[in-house]
Image: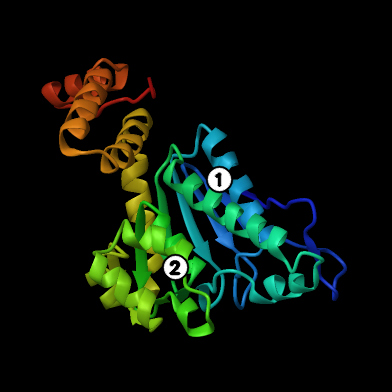
Amino acid sequence: MAEIIGLPGQTMDPGTGGPVHPVSVRQDKTICRIVLSNPPANALSIATMETVMAALRGAADEPDCRVVVIAAEGRVFSAGHDLKELTAHRADADGGRAFYERTMRLCADLMQAIVRHPKPVIAEVAGLATAAGCQLVASCDLAIASEEATFCTPGVNIGLFCSTPMVALSRNLSRKHAMEMLLTGETIDARSAREFGLVNRVVPPEYLATVVLKYATTIASKSPLTVKIGKEAFYAQAEMGLAEAYDYAASVMVGNVMAQDAKEGIGAFIEKRRPEWTGE
């Protein structure tokens, strides 16, 4: 079943007079695909970010959705913030400060919504991911890239350091690799992105969607409760000291082993049968 999600304030197509949806959302069985659908730049405008946020909330509330995939139409995954939109607000009475604060706050909320989402989020990257677009990739739980994909944080080249993308990069890449991207602003290819830890796998472009679907389907076959518990615990313990992390993880495992799905999964393993998950 395919569904398009719009939002108040969406732009209008001057040719057809109809609404332009910056994002499309499609769910096929257990996989929900959120697709940036405003090429060529797929910029993260206010409208786009609000729509992605709405789509993420919808996926969180949809019981049949087990995995979320974020992809894009065209040759650019996302060029980051809409610089024309930002520039237009310099004419505001406050020089654009209120709009810039709203933009950066919304972007931060979007990235955190991905990390805190109860379901795994996979980035499917076919083309260029730059600035906040690169941040979007880094914020996802997994990222699969085409051999043709490229990545950069080029803000330093235009006098605007990629400080918010830095948050996601510094939590996924080594410090040296993150600083290399942030300080030089140079574009790296998909192989380097994998070496840096920005993406999980690099595949030929014709196999990208297939490989992403395989990952998503494999994850969707697991207990949704177990995956939710595990994802939340992963990010929580990563911010803790060693002893605190072990105390926290031990308590999480105790709660997990008490769950019905753990009882079912362990019983199925012992009895050599396929488990039947209830999400409880």
* Image coordinates for residue 17, horizontal then vertical, percent: 88, 68
Q: Kindly identify the amino acid type of the residue bearing the numbered disc 2.
A: Cys
Badge 2 crowding class, 10 Å Cα cut-off, few under 14, some 14 to 19, many 20 or more, is many
Q: Residue at x 24, y 71 (%)?
A: 176
Q: Is residue 45 above or below residue 102?
A: below
Task: Tell me the residue at 47%/47% (across/down).
Answer: 112
Label 2 or label 1, whichever lies nearer to me, is 2
The image quadrant of residue 125 is: bottom left
**Disc number at residue 134?**
2
Q: Amino acid at mark 1?
A: Leu
Asked if 201 appears above or below 270 in the picture, the reply is below
Instruction: Name the foreground residue: 219 vs 86.
Output: 86
Residue 83, percent from left and from top: 64, 75
Visual colour scheme: rainbow
Do residues under tags 2 and 1 come within 8 Å of each other at their CB atoms? no
- Can you name the residue that lies furthest to the right here? 17
The residue positioned 41% from the left and 54% from the top of the image is 140
The residue positioned 85% from the left and 74% from the top of the image is: 14
Residue 67 as seen in the image, left or right of residue 231: right
**Quarter of the C terminus within the rendering:** top left
> Would residue 203 be visible to someone looking at this image?
no
> Is residue 143 among the parts visible in the rendering?
yes
Figure quadrant of residue 244? top left
Task: Indicate which disc, 2 or 1, sits on the residue closer to the N terminus.
Answer: 1
Between 44 and 31, the residue placed more toward the observer is: 44
Is 127 situated left or right of 215 in this image? right
- The residue labelled by disc 1 is 56
The x, y position of residue 91, in whole percent, is 80, 73
Q: Which mark is residue 91?
A: none
